Amino acid sequence: MEDFEPIVIAFCCHYCAYTAADLAGTMRLQYPSNVRIIRLPCTGKVDVRHLLEAFEKGADGVYVAGCMEGDCHFLKGNFRAKKRVAWAKKILEDVGIGGDRLEMYNMSAAMGPRFAEVAREMTEKIRKLGPSPAKIAKSIEHRAESKKENERHAQGVT
Ligand code: FES
Protein backbone atom coordinates (compact mmCIF):
# COMPACT_ATOMS: atom_id res chain seq x y z
CA MET A 1 0.00 0.00 0.00
CA GLU A 2 3.10 2.23 0.01
CA ASP A 3 2.39 3.77 -3.39
CA PHE A 4 -1.23 4.57 -2.53
CA GLU A 5 -2.01 8.20 -3.26
CA PRO A 6 -5.40 9.08 -1.81
CA ILE A 7 -7.90 11.25 -3.60
CA VAL A 8 -9.34 13.71 -1.11
CA ILE A 9 -12.23 15.97 -2.05
CA ALA A 10 -12.64 19.22 -0.13
CA PHE A 11 -15.97 21.01 -0.37
CA CYS A 12 -14.92 24.56 0.51
CA CYS A 13 -17.02 27.61 1.23
CA HIS A 14 -16.08 30.50 -1.03
CA TYR A 15 -16.00 32.97 1.88
CA CYS A 16 -13.64 31.12 4.17
CA ALA A 17 -11.86 27.84 3.32
CA TYR A 18 -11.57 28.64 -0.40
CA THR A 19 -10.09 32.04 0.39
CA ALA A 20 -7.88 30.42 3.04
CA ALA A 21 -6.63 28.00 0.36
CA ASP A 22 -5.79 30.99 -1.82
CA LEU A 23 -3.96 32.59 1.07
CA ALA A 24 -2.04 29.37 1.71
CA GLY A 25 -0.94 29.54 -1.93
CA THR A 26 0.08 33.20 -1.61
CA MET A 27 2.01 32.37 1.56
CA ARG A 28 3.70 29.54 -0.37
CA LEU A 29 2.55 27.00 2.19
CA GLN A 30 2.84 23.43 1.00
CA TYR A 31 -0.18 21.18 1.09
CA PRO A 32 -0.70 17.85 -0.70
CA SER A 33 -1.90 17.87 -4.28
CA ASN A 34 -4.13 14.93 -3.29
CA VAL A 35 -6.69 17.48 -2.14
CA ARG A 36 -9.10 18.56 -4.87
CA ILE A 37 -11.17 21.58 -4.01
CA ILE A 38 -14.80 22.08 -4.95
CA ARG A 39 -15.89 25.66 -4.32
CA LEU A 40 -19.33 26.28 -2.85
CA PRO A 41 -21.09 29.59 -2.21
CA CYS A 42 -21.70 28.26 1.34
CA THR A 43 -21.34 24.81 2.91
CA GLY A 44 -25.11 24.92 3.41
CA LYS A 45 -25.27 23.98 -0.29
CA VAL A 46 -23.66 20.61 0.31
CA ASP A 47 -26.07 17.73 0.46
CA VAL A 48 -25.66 14.22 1.86
CA ARG A 49 -26.05 12.99 -1.73
CA HIS A 50 -23.00 15.06 -2.87
CA LEU A 51 -20.88 13.65 -0.07
CA LEU A 52 -21.81 10.05 -0.86
CA GLU A 53 -21.44 10.61 -4.61
CA ALA A 54 -17.88 11.79 -4.09
CA PHE A 55 -17.05 8.35 -2.66
CA GLU A 56 -18.98 6.62 -5.42
CA LYS A 57 -16.91 8.53 -7.99
CA GLY A 58 -13.58 7.50 -6.48
CA ALA A 59 -12.76 9.68 -3.50
CA ASP A 60 -10.91 8.00 -0.65
CA GLY A 61 -11.67 10.81 1.75
CA VAL A 62 -13.91 13.88 1.78
CA TYR A 63 -14.14 16.97 3.94
CA VAL A 64 -16.32 20.01 4.16
CA ALA A 65 -14.71 23.27 5.23
CA GLY A 66 -17.00 26.10 6.20
CA CYS A 67 -16.94 29.40 8.03
CA MET A 68 -16.47 29.54 11.79
CA GLU A 69 -19.64 28.81 13.71
CA GLY A 70 -21.65 32.04 13.93
CA ASP A 71 -19.85 33.54 10.90
CA CYS A 72 -21.74 31.91 8.02
CA HIS A 73 -22.83 34.55 5.49
CA PHE A 74 -26.13 32.70 5.15
CA LEU A 75 -26.53 32.42 8.92
CA LYS A 76 -27.00 28.69 9.40
CA GLY A 77 -25.40 27.13 6.33
CA ASN A 78 -22.44 25.68 8.23
CA PHE A 79 -24.75 24.27 10.92
CA ARG A 80 -26.79 22.55 8.20
CA ALA A 81 -23.58 21.20 6.70
CA LYS A 82 -22.46 19.95 10.11
CA LYS A 83 -25.70 17.97 10.49
CA ARG A 84 -25.45 16.58 6.96
CA VAL A 85 -21.83 15.54 7.48
CA ALA A 86 -22.84 13.76 10.71
CA TRP A 87 -25.65 11.98 8.87
CA ALA A 88 -23.42 11.00 5.93
CA LYS A 89 -20.75 9.72 8.37
CA LYS A 90 -23.36 7.39 9.85
CA ILE A 91 -24.37 6.13 6.39
CA LEU A 92 -20.72 5.58 5.44
CA GLU A 93 -20.19 3.64 8.65
CA ASP A 94 -23.31 1.53 8.03
CA VAL A 95 -22.33 0.60 4.47
CA GLY A 96 -18.77 -0.30 5.47
CA ILE A 97 -16.90 2.58 3.83
CA GLY A 98 -16.11 4.11 7.22
CA GLY A 99 -17.43 7.32 8.73
CA ASP A 100 -13.95 8.54 9.61
CA ARG A 101 -13.24 9.13 5.92
CA LEU A 102 -15.50 12.19 6.11
CA GLU A 103 -14.93 15.27 8.28
CA MET A 104 -16.17 18.81 8.80
CA TYR A 105 -13.87 21.74 9.57
CA ASN A 106 -14.45 25.39 10.30
CA MET A 107 -12.01 28.14 9.47
CA SER A 108 -11.84 31.79 8.52
CA ALA A 109 -10.51 33.32 5.31
CA ALA A 110 -7.41 34.44 7.24
CA MET A 111 -6.48 30.89 8.22
CA GLY A 112 -4.20 29.97 5.32
CA PRO A 113 -1.86 27.93 7.56
CA ARG A 114 -4.83 26.10 9.07
CA PHE A 115 -6.11 25.26 5.57
CA ALA A 116 -2.74 23.71 4.69
CA GLU A 117 -2.64 21.87 8.03
CA VAL A 118 -6.14 20.39 7.53
CA ALA A 119 -5.24 19.32 3.98
CA ARG A 120 -2.12 17.55 5.28
CA GLU A 121 -3.99 16.06 8.23
CA MET A 122 -6.80 14.61 6.09
CA THR A 123 -4.43 13.29 3.42
CA GLU A 124 -2.28 11.51 6.01
CA LYS A 125 -5.30 10.08 7.81
CA ILE A 126 -6.75 8.71 4.55
CA ARG A 127 -3.35 7.42 3.47
CA LYS A 128 -3.23 5.38 6.69
CA LEU A 129 -6.79 4.12 6.18
CA GLY A 130 -5.95 2.97 2.65
CA PRO A 131 -8.14 3.06 -0.47
CA SER A 132 -11.87 3.45 0.02
CA PRO A 133 -13.71 0.11 0.09
CA ALA A 134 -16.12 1.63 -2.46
CA LYS A 135 -13.21 2.13 -4.85
CA ILE A 136 -11.91 -1.41 -4.26
CA ALA A 137 -15.38 -2.89 -4.89
CA LYS A 138 -15.68 -0.86 -8.10
CA SER A 139 -12.29 -2.01 -9.35
CA ILE A 140 -13.13 -5.70 -8.62
CA GLU A 141 -16.43 -5.25 -10.49
CA HIS A 142 -14.62 -3.60 -13.39
CA ARG A 143 -12.04 -6.41 -13.58
CA ALA A 144 -14.80 -9.05 -13.55
CA GLU A 145 -16.60 -7.25 -16.38
CA SER A 146 -13.38 -6.98 -18.43
CA LYS A 147 -12.74 -10.68 -17.89
CA LYS A 148 -16.23 -11.56 -19.10
CA GLU A 149 -15.79 -9.26 -22.10
CA ASN A 150 -12.48 -10.95 -23.01
CA GLU A 151 -14.06 -14.38 -22.68
CA ARG A 152 -16.92 -13.35 -25.00
CA HIS A 153 -14.39 -12.07 -27.55
CA ALA A 154 -12.38 -15.30 -27.29
CA GLN A 155 -15.58 -17.27 -28.03
CA GLY A 156 -16.32 -15.05 -31.02
CA VAL A 157 -19.40 -13.49 -29.43
CA THR A 158 -19.67 -9.74 -29.98
FE1 FES B 1 -19.30 30.04 4.61
FE2 FES B 1 -21.91 29.60 4.91
S1 FES B 1 -20.98 31.30 3.98
S2 FES B 1 -20.24 28.33 5.45
Image (spheres, rainbow, N blue to C red):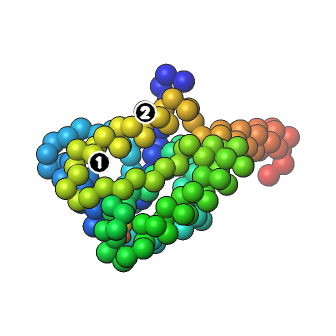
Residue 61 shown left or right of residue 69 in the figure: right
Mark 2, residue position: 124
Q: Quadrant of residue 141?
A: top right
Residue 26: give x, y in percent of width and height.
14, 50
The residue at 65%/40% (across/down) is 133
Front residue (pair 6, 73): 73
Front residue (pair 93, 152): 93
* Local crowd size for mark 2, using a 10 Å CA cut-off: few (<14), some (14–19), many (≥20): some
Secondary structure of the residue carrying numbered label 1 = helix
Amino acid type, residue under disc 1 in the picture: Phe
Residue 117: give x, y in percent of width and height.
31, 40
Residue 158 shown left or right of residue 90 in the figure: right
The residue at 31%/68% (across/down) is 71
Secondary structure of the residue carrying numbered label 2 = helix
Mark 1, residue position: 115
Residue 48: give x, y in percent of width and height.
58, 64
Checking the image for residue 127, the label placed there is none
Is residue 135 among what the camera can see?
Answer: no
Front residue (pair 60, 67): 67
* Local crowd size for mark 1, using a 10 Å CA cut-off: few (<14), some (14–19), many (≥20): many
Q: Answer with the quadrant where ligand 1 appears in the image.
A: bottom left
The answer to whether 50 is drawn above or below residue 74 in the figure is above
The residue at 39%/37% (across/down) is 121
Residue 5 shown left or right of residue 100 in the figure: left
Furthest-bottom residue in view? 74
Would the CB of label 2 be found within 8 Å of ligand 1? no
